[in-house]
Structures are given as structure tokens and as C-alpha cells.
């Protein structure tokens, strides 16, 4: 079995058993990054020395007979929004160019403590604002399925790294869909845990009440293993939930939907939805029904206002969270010529350092919070947020999970929506409600769209703190589809002509 | 710089002042409001900082539970309601002393609200209504280098120290205070003084005005006498002592009165108090006030103190000033007037401590309200700031009671203590102030006085005892006052019986 095509679970098992060293695994992935990232452009920063040192530490631990964690020695691609002491953290923004954080995020610490090997920092839309990575201040990441297409966003770098077999694991953040939508368009698995289940400490804030760090992987079990490493109460995050992490790994191992009641959100379909996406979604429903689940239609009438509410609440918080990038303490500084005053330097720096989407949201948010407009905009949006939460509560009173396509279309082409922010925003139409309500959701690949041959994502949404249900449904669907396809979704890329550049055909495997 | 002012009496004849006081109290919690950094005054710049109070990307605040406890106790002591549920908000504005470019502060959901306190000023009681007491964090400190004023305008560059960033503050805001008339500045001073004493007795703050751990923004407006519509107000900042509260308001009332009497309009603005010159200058105009775009702080969960906890904290409140006064008056047997004098002089603490050190209440009152009040007034300081402790005052009185010194000598002892000559006993020894109680020395002086005043001696022998005063005076003069007058009288009468 090839190292690169192995699951994280298998790699960890092989490392623990001594069949392969963590260094070999890490080196293989570093080599793959070296070979393909020039085309994919998933990484903003690859930290070879750090990765190999971390791998060696795991090997030494094993040699000393110490017990290894379930993901020890497994490489991971880290979205460039998590602080990692001593490594650049830019959030895809020029305004943070050169900033090296002096502290680790809680999730970084949890990963390092678990022996996970951080390969580097992945590209993203600036401050996680976007659905394509085209808003990165550095470059656009390409979709490994088709390099003329976007990899999704904001976590397009992490998702592309998984799809290009540069890393078996990644971490991202999901504010309106930034984990799930990239997962959907790259044929990978992405989870937005319950808000507060994963710590935001050390995760550079976009919209504090929505931001949710979560796991990204190529399989449901790998996502669950990573979920169980990064989740848990953090006293440094006031909004963190002090409750036990559900048994997501158990749920992923024993995916079983018999007797489960699945609600299809009526509002997510029809106009604006790519026929191929709807087709694969409907087929997945039939598959789940065949596995013993009961499928019903559920209406969530306020979901149609979710996008509008989101684009008031999120920019409001953005306008405040991004204020601190003022050139005074770190990052970019423009115009400090001894003549300009402090406000001039702030203005010049922010003008030069932020991209147009960041500026757009700062301006919208500043307006929405302004005296005289607050009630009409921010206040109304919060009311809608409550109504959406009530829609979920009502739905979860009758069904165990809700499902929808993750995003209305497959990966669109690079450049297609850059001049049409509303079209770009619609990529998150189905993912935003879970962020507003603070519950949890997953995107699992459910096939290639017959109209363009690109991956389609299937979204499962569950009540807050019932994250295990995501893995239960996801694992059941994944197992059945993998059986039918004779391999995982990404195997279809690796073994195809389109994926030849990945150099991963089974015959050419490393081991 | 000084503007035209109207005479104070003239100003008050025409106008009624309306006060509004915003007092910031720095809490003395061990750590800062939202992080674990030490909350301590001083320290090398930027040494008491961490990712949270530096506002580094990704850092998050967590509320200091002790700060909430202090805020609730302050609220309870001010007879406030305590919120069941309240949130912090973000006050957004760009300034280099704010690491996040927003201040985390309570806004429309204060932890404490709707309170009151009663103050006695010159025998008259004023009720001050408290609108709210809310929690917030302090900003860092800017030091402007270059330029002549030490303020930002004209500075060559500025340095910033974030040690203070994130210090927990409670801001106490009054409702408009009306009906104080000419006493407005005194009422304001008494209120701030009351708060200072209250914070000390609660143990929640060091309340050092000179270090900024208690800061007062003094709002005042004038309206024509008898009117009910408030005028436009000014908010005076940089008021860093109790005396400045009174002085700054007196000045502002006179200045506004001059403006209004001259047919002008008061600008609603912030003004800066200049302690040395005794005047205010305009600062930021409130008419162009910034829009702070407050919204609930999404990084913090709401504060929801349980009723049980609040009641438990109520049980920890120390004796409140009004209750204490009633108790002390009973213990000391002071008349209303005597108590009022003591309160007005700010002498309750020192009298209580002097009594605790063994002096009688009347003796303690006598020393603090006469000799020591005079000296404090001369030096322009508060009684508690004099270089003599209540224990030393009690020792002086003990010397008087023991007959070691008389009242006149006791005043010299006090003078010596204030001059740094040591304890009262040290001063007596050092200055040789003990009364002459050796009968031999006294007898010699009495004999000399009789010999020098034969006429007076003869009259006393004839029974005119009131004439003894002249001989006693002569003896006292001879002994430079260091004699027990009563003993001298006894000796004179015995000699001439």
C-alpha cells in the first residue's frame, strides 16, 4: 500500500507497529508537496525541518517503548489561520506578512501533544473570507481535480492538500462553510463541529460568534480521529463548551443508519442548483434509505433569509475583529516616514494590506453597526438568527439529522465569480444555517456530477453536541459508496488521467 | 489660557448647576480583567503583558471572576440592583493605546444599576442617584515625547506601555444631580471622597487618585435659576485629587456662567483641567462625537450571577459610612454638631484610630479639629496626610493625662513630631519639654516670685486668693511654661497661708 494513498488511521497503525517510520511517512508527503504543489499551490509555507523533527520525535518515542496516540506521526496541513509558534501566520493576508506568532493555538498544542506532524501552513481566502482562495493575498490554489477550477474556500489550501495527497489530514475553520464547501468541491471530508466544541484560542478571528475550527480528511474515520484530538473544553476560550466530546470515532467505525430519521431540507434545491449535484444528492438519499434510514421532507422556512442575516452579522464582527491590524504592533506598516501621523500610517497600511473582499466586509460591517442603522441591520439579523435556530429546533424535534447538498454547484472555474460577490456568496447557501445556529455539520463526497465529472458533496446537519450523528451517517454512506465504486472518492482521481500528475497510480506506489 | 469667569456668588445667583459624575475605579485584583497578567502599577514598560492583553491575532479574553465579584459588591454597597444576566460589548475606535482597537466594556447591560447614596454636606443631606456601575478594561498608556505640552499635539513621537492594558475598571455613573446650588462643588467632592472611602472599606481598590486608580470625569451644566431644562454640559477630565474636583467644578461653573451671561452658548465638549493654573481648556468636541458602534462582545459568554451568590456577597459588605457615623456618634457621645464638624473635616478615621490607641473621644476630637486641622490647612493637605499618626496623637494626650506636659507643651510636642523629631516621647526628651514637677525647683521659683512681688504676696495673705494668678504667671514665665500650673498654685497658697 502506498504511504500517500493510505488513510491517516492506517498510517498511524503502521507507524505504531513499526512497519514504517514517521520520518518515512513525513518525507513521502514532503516529497509529494515538492512534486505537485507547484501546480496545486496549496501551501503558503512548508516547514520541512519542523516536520522532520516532529516525525523523529515520534519515532524516538516509539523506540523508547512509549505508547503513541491514535494519530502519532501522521502528517497534517494546517490552515494558515492557526497560530504556530515560530512559523509565519498570515491568514492569507498581506497585512500579516512577516508576523511570527509567539504562541500556539490550543488546537496546535493538542495536535503537537498528540504527535501529529505539521507539514506547513495552507493557503486560504484572506482572513477566511471567500469560497475559492481567490481572495488570498498571495495566490490562488488550484483544484486537484481540474486545475482551471477553484478548490473552494476559504480552506481551499487544506482541501486541495488532501485531494492532491500532499497530506492525509488538515485542519480548517468554518464560519459559513469554509471547511465543508472546499471538502465538497475537492471530494474530501470536512466537518464543522458544534460551535464551542473546538477551541478558538489562537485561531485568528473572522466572525467570533460563527468561527468553528474543525477536521478535514479523505475519510470519515480519519476526520473522526482528528476531531477527537482537537475537540474539548478550553478554559482560554470563554465560548468553549464544557461537555464531554461525543464518541465520534466509535460512530465513524460503526456507521449505521438503520432506524435513523433523516430530514431533507425542502428549501435547499431547485433553482440555482446544478442538476448533476441534485442527481447525486438524490441517489445518496436513496442509498441511505436502502441502508435502513427513513427519509422525510422537512421545511425550514427561515433558511431563505440565512444568507442575508449572515452577511450582516459576519461583516459586523469582521469590522471589529480586523480593526487591530493597524500597523502599530505587528505585521505590515506602510507610510511610516517620520512625517505621517499615526492615523495616516493606520490608513495607508490598511489600504495597502487588505484585499478588496476584506475591505468590502469591513465597510458593510461598519455600516451595519453604525448608530441609527444598528437595529435595522445587525439587530434584525440577530432576530433572523434566532428564527433559524428555532427552525432547526423544530426540525430536530421530528428528525435525527437534516441533509442537503453541501453547495449548489460543483467547483466553478477560477475567475468565474470574482467580479460577482453575490454569486460567490451563494456557494455557502446550504452551509450557513448551521453556523448561525451553532450546531454541527459534515460534508461527505457522494459522487462525481454526471454533467462535469467533478465531486459533489453531501451535507449532514445534526443538533449541537450530537456531532457523533454526523459520523454515523457519513460512515454509513461512505462505506456503501466505496464498496460500489471499488475505492474511495479520491482513488478515482488518483487513478484517472486527470490525476496522472499526482503520480499515484497503484502500480507506482511508494511501498 | 484662562477664560472670562463670573464671580462665584454672582454665578449662583443667576444659575442652578446640574452635576453628573463618572468615576472610574481600578480594581486591585491580582490579575487583569481578561487574562492572567499581573495587575500592578509601575513595572518596566510592556513587561506585564501576554497575547491576550496585547490583542495578538487569535487571542481571546476570559472574564476575571474576582473582578465581577468586586463589581457586584460595589453595586450592592451603592444600593444598586444587580443584573441577573448581562453582557460585555465592544466599543470600537482606533487608538494606539487600544491593542484590539476596541475596548471591551459593558454598554447597555451594566452589572449594577439604579442605586443611590446619601451624602451629608455641611449638615444638609443630598441624595445622589446612581444610574449604573459597569465593568470595563483600561487601555495602555501613551507617553508623548517631544513638544512642549506632553500631550499628543506637537509630540515628535509617542511610546506606549501596555502594562495597564486590560486593568479591570468599574465605572460608576450618577444620574444628573440637581438642587445642590452653591454647594455643587462641595457635593461633588464629598461624593468622590465617599466613593474613595467606600472602595477602601470594600477592599476592592487602592483608590490612589494621583496614580489614576480612581479617576473622576466631572460633568456640569448650568440652567437659569428655577428652570427645569438642563443646559449643555461640559465634561472635565484630568481631575486628579479631591481638591481638584471642587476647584475644577467651581471654575467651570464660573466660566459657563460668564459665557451664558454674555449671551454666548456653552459648547458640549470635553475639557482638560490644569491643576497648576486652576483652569480648564477645551478638548474633544462631543458634538462631533465618534460613533463607537457598540455591539455585544461575541468572544465572551454573558455574565449571569446567581441570586445566591449575590446574597452571599451582600453578606460580605463592610459597615457602610452612614451606619458607621451613627455608631461612632453613639460610642463617642458627640453632639450632632461635633459629629458634623468631624465629618466635614474628614476626621472620622483619624479620631477613631486615636480613640482605639487609648485617647478619649473628646481629646481625640480636640486635637484633630483644632491644632491638627489648623496645621493641615496651613499645609494644604488632608488630616490623614499629616506626618503624625493617630497613635502618636494618643501618646501626646497620654503625656498630658500623666501630667508630663501641659496643653501648651503638648502643642510643641506635636510640632516636633510633625517636624520629624521622632515620637512624642522623643520630642519631650529632645526638646526638654517635660513640666518641672520637682517641688524643690518649683519652691525655689515660688520663693523668688514672692520675693519679687511683695505687694501681691501681701494681698494673698490678706485672703485675696484671686491675686495668686499673678504669682503663678511669674513662676510659669520663670520656668518657660514647663510647670504644672495647678501644683504651682498649691505651693503659692501653702507658702502664703
Image: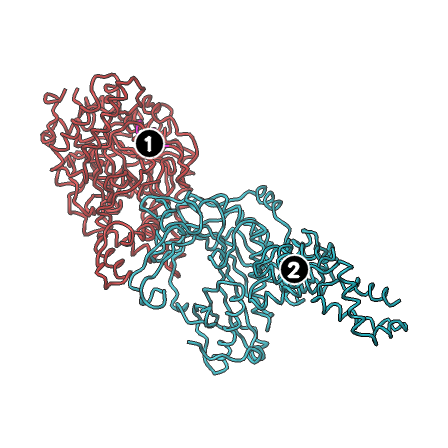
Chain colours: A red, B cyan
Verify whether residue A229 appears in magenta: yes
Q: Is residue B221 left or right of residue A181?
A: right
Please state the horizontal and vertical placement of residue A447, each as a whole percent of the image. 21, 30
**Residue drawn at 40 percent across, 41 percent down:** A391
Span shown in magenta: A225-231
Both on one chain, marks 2 and 1? Answer: no
Q: Nearer the viewer, residue A190 or B195?
A: B195
Position of residue A296 relative to residue A7, above or below, is below
Which numbered disc, 2 or 1, marks the residue closer to the eye? 2
**Where on the picture, by quarter, is residue A293?**
top left
Position of residue A243 relative to residue A154, above or below, is above
Q: Main secondary structure of the magenta part?
A: helix
- Which residue does the numbered mark 2 point to in the structure image? B432
Return the mark for residue A110. Answer: 1
Residue that sits furthest to the bottom in the current view: B262
Please state the horizontal and vertical placement of residue A25, each as a whole percent of the image. 19, 24
Marks 2 and 1 close (CB-CB < 8 Å) = no
Amino acid at each position: 500500500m502506498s504511504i500517500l494513498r493510505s488513510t491517516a488511521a492506517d498510517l498511524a497503525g503502521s507507524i505504531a507497529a513499526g512497519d514504517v517510520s514517521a520520518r518515512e511517512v513525513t518525507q513521502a508527503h514532503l516529497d509529494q508537496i515538492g512534486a505537485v504543489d507547484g501546480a496545486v499551490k496549496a501551501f503558503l509555507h512548508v516547514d520541512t525541518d519542523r516536520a522532520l523533527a516532529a516525525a523523529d520525535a515520534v519515532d524516538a518515542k516509539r523506540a523508547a517503548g512509549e505508547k503513541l496516540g491514535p494519530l502519532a506521526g501522521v502528517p497534517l496541513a494546517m490552515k494558515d489561520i492557526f497560530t504556530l509558534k515560530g512559523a509565519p501566520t498570515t491568514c492569507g493576508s498581506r497585512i500579516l506578512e512577516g508576523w511570527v506568532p509567539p504562541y500556539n493555538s490550543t488546537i496546535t498544542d493538542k495536535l503537537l501533544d498528540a504527535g501529529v506532524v505539521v507539514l506547513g501552513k495552507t493557503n486560504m481566502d484572506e482572513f477566511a473570507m471567500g469560497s475559492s482562495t481567490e481572495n488570498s493575498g498571495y495566490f490562488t490554489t488550484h483544484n486537484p481535480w481540474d486545475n482551471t477550477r477553484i478548490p473552494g474556500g476559504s480552506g481551499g489550501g487544506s482541501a486541495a492538500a488532501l485531494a492532491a495527497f500532499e497530506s492525509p489530514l488538515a485542519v480548517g475553520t468554518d464560519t459559513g462553510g469554509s471547511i465543508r464547501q472546499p471538502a465538497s468541491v475537492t471530494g474530501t471530508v470536512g466537518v464543522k463541529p458544534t460551535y464551542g466544541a473546538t477551541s478558538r484560542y489562537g485561531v485568528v478571528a473572522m466572525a467570533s460568534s460563527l468561527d468553528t475550527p474543525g477536521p478535514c480528511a479523505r475519510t470519515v474515520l480519519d476526520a473522526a480521529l482528528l476531531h477527537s484530538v482537537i475537540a474539548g473544553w478550553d478554559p482560554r476560550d470563554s465560548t468553549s463548551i464544557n461537555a464531554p466530546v461525543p464518541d465520534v470515532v466509535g460512530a465513524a467505525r460503526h456507521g449505521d443508519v438503520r432506524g435513523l430519521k433523516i430530514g431533507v431540507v425542502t428549501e435547499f434545491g431547485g433553482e440555482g442548483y446544478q442538476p448533476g449535484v441534485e442527481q447525486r444528492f438524490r441517489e445518496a438519499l436513496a442509498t441511505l434509505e436502502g441502508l435502513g434510514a427513513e427519509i422525510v421532507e422537512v421545511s425550514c422556512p427561515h433558511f431563505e433569509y440565512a444568507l442575508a442575516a449572515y452577511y450582516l452579522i459576519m461583516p459586523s464582527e469582521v469590522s471589529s475583529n480586523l480593526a487591530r491590524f493597524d500597523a502599530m504592533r505587528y505585521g505590515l506598516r506602510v507610510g511610516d516616514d517620520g512625517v505621517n501621523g499615526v492615523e495616516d500610517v493606520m490608513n495607508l497600511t490598511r489600504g495597502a494590506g487588505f484585499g478588496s473582499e476584506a475591505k468590502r466586509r469591513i465597510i458593510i460591517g461598519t455600516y451595519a453597526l453604525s448608530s441609527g442603522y444598528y437595529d435595522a441591520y445587525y439587530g434584525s439579523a440577530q432576530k433572523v438568527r434566532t428564527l433559524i435556530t428555532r427552525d432547526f429546533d423544530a426540525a430536530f424535534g421530528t428528525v435525527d439529522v437534516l441533509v442537503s447538498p453541501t453547495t449548489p454547484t460543483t467547483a466553478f472555474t477560477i475567475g468565474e465569480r470574482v467580479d460577482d460577490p453575490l454569486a460567490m456568496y451563494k456557494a455557502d447557501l446550504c452551509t450557513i444555517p448551521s453556523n448561525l445556529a451553532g450546531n454541527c455539520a459534515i460534508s461527505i463526497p457522494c459522487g462525481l456530477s454526471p454533467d462535469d465529472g467533478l465531486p459533489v458533496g453531501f451535507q449532514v446537519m445534526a443538533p449541537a453536541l450530537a456531532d457523533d450523528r454526523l459520523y454515523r451517517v457519513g460512515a454509513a454512506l461512505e462505506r456503501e459508496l466505496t464498496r460500489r465504486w471499488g475505492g474511495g472518492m479520491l482513488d478515482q482521481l488518483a487513478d484517472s488521467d486527470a490525476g496522472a500528475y499526482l503520480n499515484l497510480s497503484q502500480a507506482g506506489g511508494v511501498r | 489660557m484662562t477664560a472670562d469667569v463670573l464671580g462665584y456668588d454672582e454665578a449662583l445667583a443667576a444659575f442652578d448647576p446640574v452635576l453628573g459624575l463618572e468615576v472610574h475605579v481600578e480594581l486591585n485584583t491580582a490579575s487583569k480583567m481578561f487574562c492572567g497578567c499581573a495587575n500592578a502599577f509601575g513595572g518596566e514598560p510592556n513587561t506585564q503583558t501576554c497575547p491576550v492583553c496585547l490583542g495578538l491575532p487569535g487571542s481571546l479574553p476570559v472574564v476575571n471572576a474576582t473582578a465581577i465579584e468586586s463589581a457586584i459588591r460595589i453595586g450592592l454597597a451603592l444600593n444598586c440592583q444587580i443584573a441577573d444576566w448581562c453582557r460585555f460589548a465592544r466599543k470600537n475606535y482606533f487608538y494606539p493605546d487600544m491593542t484590539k482597537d476596541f475596548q471591551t466594556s459593558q454598554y447597555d447591560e451594566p452589572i449594577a444599576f439604579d442605586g443611590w447614596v446619601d451624602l451629608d454636606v455641611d449638615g444638609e443631606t443630598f441624595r445622589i442617584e446612581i444610574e449604573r456601575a459597569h465593568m470595563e478594561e483600561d487601555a495602555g498608556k501613551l507617553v508623548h515625547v517631544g513638544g512642549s505640552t506632553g500631550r499628543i499635539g506637537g509630540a515628535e513621537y509617542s511610546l506606549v506601555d501596555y502594562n495597564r492594558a486590560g486593568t479591570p475598571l468599574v465605572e460608576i455613573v450618577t444620574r444628573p444631580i440637581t438642587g445642590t446650588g452653591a454647594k455643587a462643588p462641595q457635593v461633588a467632592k464629598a461624593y468622590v471622597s465617599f466613593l474613595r472611602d467606600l472602595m477602601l472599606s470594600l477592599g476592592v481598590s487602592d483608590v490612589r487618585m494621583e496614580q489614576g486608580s480612581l479617576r473622576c470625569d466631572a460633568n456640569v451644566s448650568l440652567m437659569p435659576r428655577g428652570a427645569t431644562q438642563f443646559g449643555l454640559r461640559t465634561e472635565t477630565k484630568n481631575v486628579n485629587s479631591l481638591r481638584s474636583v471642587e476647584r475644577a467644578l467651581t471654575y467651570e461653573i464660573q466660566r459657563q456662567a460668564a459665557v451664558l451671561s454674555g449671551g454666548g452658548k456653552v459648547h458640549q465638549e470635553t475639557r482638560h483641567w490644569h491643576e497648576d493654573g486652576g483652569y480648564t481648556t477645551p478638548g474633544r468636541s462631543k458634538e462631533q462625537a465618534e460613533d463607537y458602534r457598540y455591539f455585544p462582545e461575541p468572544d465572551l459568554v454573558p455574565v449571569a450571577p446567581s441570586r445566591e451568590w449575590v446574597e452571599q456577597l451582600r453578606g460580605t459588605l463592610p459597615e457602610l459610612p452612614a451606619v458607621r457615623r451613627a455608631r461612632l456618634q453613639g460610642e463617642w457621645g458627640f453632639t450632632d454638631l461635633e459629629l458634623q464638624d468631624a465629618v466635614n473635616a474628614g476626621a472620622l478615621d483619624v479620631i477613631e484610630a486615636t480613640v482605639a490607641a487609648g485617647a478619649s473621644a473628646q481629646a481625640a476630637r480636640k486635637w484633630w479639629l483644632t491644632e491638627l486641622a489648623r496645621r493641615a490647612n496651613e499645609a494644604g493637605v488632608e488630616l490623614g496626610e499629616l506626618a503624625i499618626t493617630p497613635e502618636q496623637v494618643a501618646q501626646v494626650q497620654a503625656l498630658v493625662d500623666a501630667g508630663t506636659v501641659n496643653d501648651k507643651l503638648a502643642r510643641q510636642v506635636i510640632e516636633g513630631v510633625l517636624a520629624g523629631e521622632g515620637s512624642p516621647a522623643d520630642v519631650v526628651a529632645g526638646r526638654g519639654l517635660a513640666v518641672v514637677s520637682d517641688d524643690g525647683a518649683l519652691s525655689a521659683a515660688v520663693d523668688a516670685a514672692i520675693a519679687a512681688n511683695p505687694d501681691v504676696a501681701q494681698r494673698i495673705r490678706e485672703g485675696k486668693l484671686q491675686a495668686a494668678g499673678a504669682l503663678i504667671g511669674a513662676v510659669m514665665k520663670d520656668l518657660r511654661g514647663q510647670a504644672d500650673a495647678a501644683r504651682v498654685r498649691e505651693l503659692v497658697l501653702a507658702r502664703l497661708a
